[in-house]
């Protein structure tokens, strides 16, 4: 007989669900924003070296992140499986999901690191500026050593979220931001550190310094989370890290069966933004840099939506595991409503203060950045118009994930992004001559279609869940 969870989630109404979703989502949002903050820190420091360095790190890091994001999407199923077990009151489901998730993360690490090595070659094939390609090689062939700890951290984060204990992950991630900042400054620009009568010289490593700083920070985050899970009474007794080589064929197949479509969905989503970045690079370095800055700003809202969406996936999974489909439906709609609220709040700064926001990444007083700033203002105005659709498609796909519906969302996104958005973006940007603005208008149309379709699908399937 399986051991039981001491306190499986009890039934709540609409008001209680808002509180429960918010309580789960807020620390998850904070954790994702902290991760974004570390990525921003890398770019903010590298951006002080120049627009070439910013564009190279942003582009190569963005391409590499697609491999990471696909893996993270696949591994996000661990949180759903743990959520199902938590709702059903089965402790044995925790360790099974985590063990198989860690093994899947090992397989994915090898694949992503091989991909990372060839990112500069891919950029060269995409006809990017040789200066950008050379700088990208310096960055990505160092930062690739952060892949393993980050994917292992993702699995353990899924476990903590699935049992409604995401706060520790938030604390770890937020605490590393100042450390990451200091380490980046030290390694990117170099320093003389006095040691009594002598001194230690740390050479300036440029973009590679930002990469090695990320490697150190990611291993530190993983080590701290492992230590806490092993030592904290609330998680230690679940033994999720015991017998790491034990194989559970059923859980192993579930991770890959449900996770692969999520990975494909992540590839489809991320591929859209990568394609737009490559198109922007063909227009010019100023447009590429502006696209990167605007993407970073929109990414802030997207990370909030991802946090809410991950909470939705867990809450829906917990209620399905508890045998309460009506409550699972309620949890999904609460999360979607929170996404709309977030989009409305953050659209205003994009419209009213784009230059002020751009100062996070560029020296706005430098005349050399004037053209980039002009394009940033235009792209931010367009981005503000589709934030609601961006938030809804992110949360809608994850709410469906909680219902174990992962194949159809991948197809929906493929149609919205690659059948509609990418061709339209290219048409508007090049044949019709709208440049960067055309790229973002094309994305907006594709995101709108996907968002509406995903939300309608959740509304239909949540009436009679497929699991």
Image (cartoon, grey):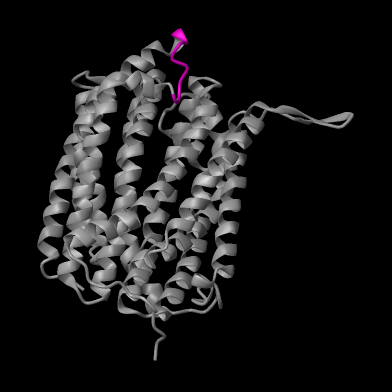
Percent x, y for residue 237? 52, 77
Magenta stretch prevailing secondary structure: loop
Which residue is situated farthest in the bottom direction here? Answer: 1
* Residue 88 falls within the magenta-colored stretch: no
Q: Position of residue 163 (x, y in %)?
A: 39, 68
> What residue do we see at 22% from left, 25% from top?
438
Looking at the image, which is closer to me, 327 or 51?
A: 327
Residue drawn at point x = 62 percent, y = 46 percent: 216
With 37 as the anchor, is 208 left or right in this view? right
Residue 440 lies in quadrant: top left
Residue 368, position as x, y percentages in the image: 45, 10
Asked if 32 appears above or below 433 in the picture, the reply is below
Check if residue 361 falls in the magenta segment: yes
Q: In this rendering, does residue 269 appear at all?
A: yes
Q: Residue at x 11, y 59 (%)?
A: 459
- Placement of the N terminus among the 4 image quadrants: bottom left
Residue 247 vs 223, above or below: the answer is below
Q: Nearer the viewer, residue 255 or 324?
A: 324
| Residue at the extreme top | 367
Question: In this orientation, does residue 408 appear?
Answer: no
Q: Is residue 353 left or right of residue 173?
A: left
User: Residue 118 in the image: x percent, y percent?
Assistant: 51, 42
**Where does the magenta region start and end?**
360-367
Q: Is residue 272 above or below residue 252?
A: above
Quadrant in which the C terminus appears:
bottom left
């Amino acid at each position: 007989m399986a051991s039981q969870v001491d306190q499986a989630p009890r039934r709540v109404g609409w008001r209680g669900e808002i509180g429960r979703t918010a309580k789960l989502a807020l620390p998850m949002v904070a954790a994702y924003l902290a991760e974004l903050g570390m990525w921003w820190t890398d770019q903010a420091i590298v951006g002080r070296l120049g627009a070439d360095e910013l564009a190279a790190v942003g582009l190569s890091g963005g391409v590499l992140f697609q491999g990471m994001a696909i893996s993270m999407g696949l591994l996000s199923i661990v949180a759903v499986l743990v959520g199902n077990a938590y709702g059903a009151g089965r402790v044995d489901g925790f360790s099974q999901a985590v063990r198989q998730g860690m093994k899947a993360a090992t397989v994915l690490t090898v694949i992503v690191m091989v991909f990372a090595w060839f990112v500069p070659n891919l950029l060269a094939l995409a006809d990017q500026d040789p200066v950008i390609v050379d700088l990208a090689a310096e960055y990505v062939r160092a930062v690739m050593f952060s892949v393993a700890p980050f994917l292992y951290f993702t699995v353990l984060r899924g476990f903590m979220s699935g049992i409604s204990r995401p706060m520790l992950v938030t604390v770890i991630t937020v605490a590393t931001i100042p450390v990451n900042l200091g380490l980046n400054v030290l390694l990117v620009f170099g320093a003389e550190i006095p040691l009594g009568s002598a001194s230690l010289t740390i050479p300036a490593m440029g973009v590679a310094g930002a990469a090695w700083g990320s490697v150190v920070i990611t291993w530190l985050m993983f080590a701290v989370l492992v230590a806490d899970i092993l030592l904290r009474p609330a998680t230690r007794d679940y033994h999720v890290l015991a017998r790491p080589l034990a194989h559970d064929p059923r859980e192993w197949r579930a991770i890959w069966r449900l996770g692969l479509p999520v990975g494909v969905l992540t590839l489809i989503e991320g591929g859209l933004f990568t394609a737009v970045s490559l198109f922007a690079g063909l227009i010019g370095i100023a447009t590429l840099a502006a696209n990167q800055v605007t993407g970073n700003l929109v990414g802030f809202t997207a990370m909030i939506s991802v946090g809410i969406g991950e909470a939705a996936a867990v809450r829906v999974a917990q209620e399905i595991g508890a045998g309460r489909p009506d409550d699972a439906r309620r949890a999904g709609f609460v999360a979607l409503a929170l996404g709309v609220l977030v989009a409305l709040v953050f659209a205003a700064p994009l419209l009213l203060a784009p230059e002020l926001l751009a100062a996070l990444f560029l020296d706005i007083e430098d005349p050399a950045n004037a053209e980039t700033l002009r394009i940033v203002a235009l792209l931010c105005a367009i981005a503000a118009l589709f934030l609601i659709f961006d938030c809804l498609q992110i949360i809608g796909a994850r709410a469906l994930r909680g219902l174990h519906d992962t194949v159809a969302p991948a197809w929906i996104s493929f149609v919205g992004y690659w059948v509609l958005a990418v061709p339209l973006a290219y048409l508007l940007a090049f044949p019709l001559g709208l440049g960067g603005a055309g790229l973002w208008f094309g994305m907006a149309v594709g995101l709108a279609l996907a968002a509406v379709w995903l939300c309608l699908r959740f509304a239909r399937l949540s009436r009679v869940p497929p699991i």
